[in-house]
Amino acid sequence: MSNISSYIIRYCWNCDVSLLLGCCDRFLSPRSCFPAMTKDGRYRDWAGLPPELTWSILSRLGTVDILEKAQKVCKSWHSVCEEPSMWRKINMHNDLGFMDSLTRSRHVAMCRNAVDRSQGGLVEIDIWYFCTDSLLNHIADSSRNLRTLRIAMCHEINDGLLEAAGKLPFLEELDISYCSFEEETLKAVGKSCPNLKTLKLNYPVLSYSDDEFAIAIAESMPELRNLQLSGNPYMSNTGLQAILDGCLHLEHLDLRECWRLGLVGDLEKLCAERIRVLRRPGDPTSGPHDMFWL
């Protein structure tokens, strides 16, 4: 490997992602101020970096940064960004919060582009705020081997999850926090995804008024290891008992702000014996995303 390539690798891996993106911005600027030479007088040859090392560097970036910045730096980077292996994982988890219609449409289009580039190799996708029924079904149709689906805070999904679940038999992790899904949808997901091991159902927009959602989980998701139910204030001991009886492999259980629960007596003893990591209703949350702790 050339000294130039070695320098670039050390430079990229010693800087954080924000600095790497800053370099991309300066390369793309018409008035680029990024120095063409190193301090010892050698030219930086970003295009000459071996593809596998370029892949290692660019894989540190999120999907939006790759599509809007990194792939435009040079032809060799663009070529690496076209490789299906770059898109086995799609990360569009962001903290934008509210999106206007233009921003939402742009993110949907970028996500579709990234899914198509994976050519069926997608195994993990993390998208917040902007997923729709149509996009979710496009993901499911294109990615039958998907293992992880995180669609927290996506309020435009209605029946899409019900339809998509039937196309995702290998799904192992599902995050539908801050969403709104009926008990029947949860039951259908469990039956369609027999390998499901992690379910995150924190602070649902649809507040379940009884234990039916807990019973749906217990009856249809027996292989669960990790279950997050923070902010489900109406679940009672009956629902929790059903989960403990139906999900015999459960190891991690988050019950923060499930205020109707009373972890005393035999139920408390059962949780202590069965659950390796337990968060109780009164346990603190350190921040707005602390519920996503697994």
Image (cartoon, helix red, strand yellow):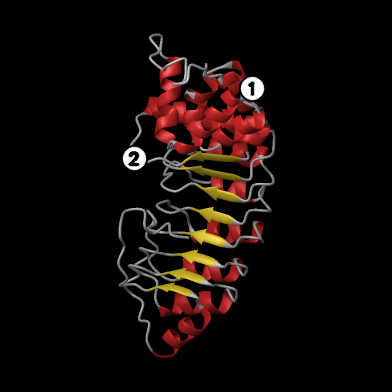
Three-letter amino acid code at disc 1?
Ser
Image-quadrant location for residue 216: bottom right
223 and 163: which is toward the camera:
223
Note whether 3 is above or below 219 in the view shown.
above
Res 124 visible: yes
Residue of label 1: 79
In the image, farthest residue toward the bottom: 265
Residue of label 2: 97
Disc 2 crowd rating (10 Å Cα; few below 14, some 14-19, many 20+) is few
Q: Position of residue 250 (x, y in %)?
A: 55, 72
Is residue 133 rendered to the left or right of residue 118? Answer: left
168 and 77: which is toward the camera:
77
Note whether 287 is above or below 209 in the view shown.
above
Image-quadrant location for residue 47: top right
User: Do residues under tags 1 and 2 come within 8 Å of each other at their CB atoms?
Assistant: no
Report how far apart the C-alphas of labels 1 and 2 lie in the structure.
32 Å
In the image, farthest residue toward the top: 30
211 and 40: which is toward the camera:
40
- How many numbered marks, from 0 up? 2
Three-letter amino acid code at disc 2?
Gly
| Residue pictured at 66% horizontal, 39% vertical | 141
Q: Position of residue 67 (x, y in %)?
A: 52, 26
Q: Earlier in the sequence, mark 1 or mark 2?
A: 1
Q: Position of residue 184 (x, y in %)?
A: 54, 59
179 and 265: which is toward the camera:
265
Q: Secondary structure at mark 1?
A: helix
